[in-house]
Image (tube, rainbow, N blue to C red):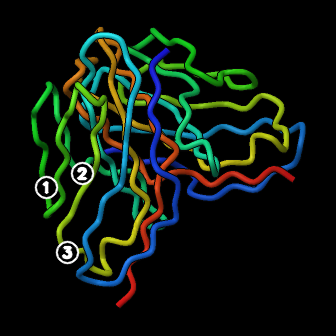
């Protein structure tokens, strides 16, 4: 079945460092891919999405490119801030209009000043 | 701009008790979902609903019951709570089941079962 694998955390970076969080997926067909962010004590918020191969999703300085050849959707940011400290989830929506998302296990990011 | 609200935010109960977690959304979204979040497992789908009176099992439905008599509400009931159901529960909604549509999440209910 469909699945999502994220790099294990926690990831600890200094402010202004470059961020990469790896995400790979297994799915039949052409899934849509998402990154969600969860700040402490809150629910998940959509960060960005890509719905077809080679699409690049971007928001708040974060980017991710849908790479079908490597089945990946890595999250990147050029210069992280303390306020980016959160848990990041990669997710996919498979083929068919079921509405269901499959999530990776989440990666905790801690940014130190 | 109420969005999606969950209640209670925190709940402590004992094993064997029945507990109901509430979820209410103001967007008239067709689809609603219940997830549990546990360390090392990410979010796992418990139940989902495509419309009022239509519900289906997700990945981990055992021990849970849902209903959807109205579009805006999607309560989750633990009929006889067990310690393994201690978790953070999230409700989510989306307008339709289309693959390019995101889900919108509530702030969660932290449930502890003693």
Q: Secondary structure at mark 3?
A: loop
Decide which of tag 3 and tag 2 comes sooner along the chain.
2
Whether discs 3 and 1 lie on one chain: the answer is yes
Gap between marks 3 and 2, in whole Å?
16 Å
Which label lies toward us, 3 or 2? Answer: 3
Residues tagged 3 and 2 counted as in contact (Cβ below 8 A): no
Q: B101 or B13: nearer the eye?
A: B101
Badge 1: residue crowd in 10 Å (few <14, some 14–19, many ≥20) = few
Residue sitting at x 56%, y 33%:
B44
Which badge, 3 or 1, comes first in the chain's sequence? 1
Marks 2 and 1 share the same chain: yes
Question: Do the residues marked 3 and 2 share a common chain?
Answer: yes
Horizontal placement of A77 versus B53: left or right?
A: left
Q: Residue A93: give x, y in percent of width and height.
A: 32, 24
Q: Which mark is residue A42?
A: none
Query: Is the residue marked by circle 3 packed among few (<14), some (14-19), or many (20+) residues within 10 Å?
Result: some
Where disc 1 sits, the SS reads: strand
Q: Is residue B97 above or below residue A89?
A: above
What residue does disc 2 label? A47
Q: Which mark is residue A79?
A: 3
Pinpoint residue A9: horizontal percent, then vertical percent: 52, 60
Looking at the picture, tell me which residue is in the foreground, A102 or A56: A56
Judging by the rendered image, the residue that carries numbered circle 1 is A59
Q: Residue furthest bottom?
A: A113
Q: Residue A36: x percent and y percent?
A: 33, 48
Residue B58 drawn at (x, y percent): 55, 19
């Amino acid at each position: 079945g469909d699945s999502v694998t994220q790099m294990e955390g926690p990831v600890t970076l200094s402010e202004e460092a470059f961020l990469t969080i790896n995400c790979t997926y297994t799915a039949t067909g052409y899934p849509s891919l998402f990154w969600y962010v969860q700040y402490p004590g809150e629910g998940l918020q959509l960060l960005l999405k890509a719905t077809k191969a080679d699409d690049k999703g971007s928001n708040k300085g974060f980017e991710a490119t849908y790479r079908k050849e490597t089945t990946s959707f890595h999250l990147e940011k050029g210069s992280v801030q303390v306020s980016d400290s959160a848990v990041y989830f990669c997710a996919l929506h498979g083929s068919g209009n079921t509405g269901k998302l499959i999530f990776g296990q989440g990666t905790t990011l801690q940014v130190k000043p | 701009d109420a969005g999606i609200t969950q209640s209670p935010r925190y709940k402590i109960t004992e094993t064997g008790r029945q507990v109901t977690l509430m979820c209410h959304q103001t967007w008239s979204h067709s689809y609603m979902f219940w997830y549990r979040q546990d360390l090392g497992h990410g979010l796992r789908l418990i139940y989902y609903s495509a419309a009022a009176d239509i519900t289906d099992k997700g990945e981990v439905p055992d021990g849970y019951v849902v209903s959807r008599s109205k579009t805006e509400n999607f309560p989750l009931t633990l009929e006889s709570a067990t310690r393994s159901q201690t978790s953070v529960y999230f409700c989510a909604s989306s307008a339709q089941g289309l693959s390019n549509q995101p889900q919108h999440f509530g702030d969660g209910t932290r449930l502890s079962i003693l």
